[in-house]
Amino acid sequence: MSMKLNRIFRTLLIVVILGSNIGCDQISKSVVRERIQIDQQFGFIDNHVLLMKVENPGAFLSLGDSLPRFLRILLLTIIPVIVLSLGFIYVLAKKTLSKGMVTGACFVIGGGVGNIYDRIVYVSVTDFLHIDFGIFRTGIFNMADVSILVGAFIIVLDSQISKPEEKINQV
């Protein structure tokens, strides 16, 4: 394949992965916003998986929700927008990143964009899933959070299984 075709395919793949992550997140949140009331809860698998609607003005596990408005906007919106934008530019520009690293970064960026979009448009992030299997218990989360965790896992896994000569060149 020619260099130009490779570059086009790579860019298209990045856009598709990002779009899929953002789309899945926003569609699921839209359904929850439209169809579930704040006081409603739906249990599945003997109530080990709960579907509910929570509007979270903070970050993960409501961190930062009690900060003054200016600090909350700066720390939870402006700085993340800058970091996600720089990450996107880096993924597009750095042609030597492995496929796993690009995929993981796109999942993280896509999840981040999904939550930032909520923060900008709705002033809070819609969370709606809670899992409780005894010792395995989560906070209330959304699909953007899943994207971020899956992306981080892919990045860590990719960095551990990359070829030894790649690791030497990265030092």
Image (spheres, grey):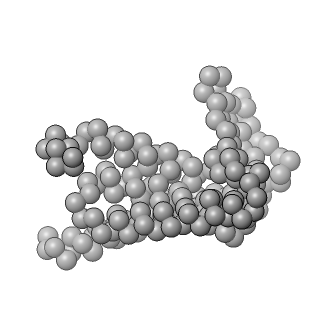
Query: Which residue does the image show at 71% across and 65% down from the upper left?
Result: 70
Q: Nearer the viewer, residue 79 or 136?
A: 79
Residue 132 appears left or right of 111: right
Q: Nearer the viewer, residue 48 or 169?
A: 169
Query: Which residue does the image show at 62% across and 59% down from the upper left?
Result: 75
Q: Position of residue 170 (x, y in %)?
A: 21, 49
Check the image and name the residue furthest to the right.
Answer: 39
Q: Nearer the viewer, residue 99 or 37?
A: 99
Does residue 140 appear anywhere in the picture?
yes
Quadrant for the N terminus, please. bottom left
Does residue 53 appear anywhere in the picture?
no
Q: Position of residue 17 (x, y in %)?
A: 42, 61
Query: Which residue does the image show at 57% across and 49% down from the upper left?
Result: 145
Residue 85 appears left or right of 89: right
The answer to whether 2 is drawn above or below residue 106 in the figure is below
The answer to whether 169 is drawn above or below residue 138 in the figure is below
Q: Position of residue 118 (x, y in %)?
A: 66, 64
Residue 43 appears left or right of 37: left
Q: Nearer the viewer, residue 80 or 116?
A: 80
Q: How many marks?
A: 0
Query: Which residue does the image show at 48% across and 63% down from the upper left?
Result: 84
The answer to whether 30 is drawn above or below residue 148 in the figure is below
Residue 65 appears left or right of 82: right
Check the image and name the residue furthest to the top.
Answer: 135
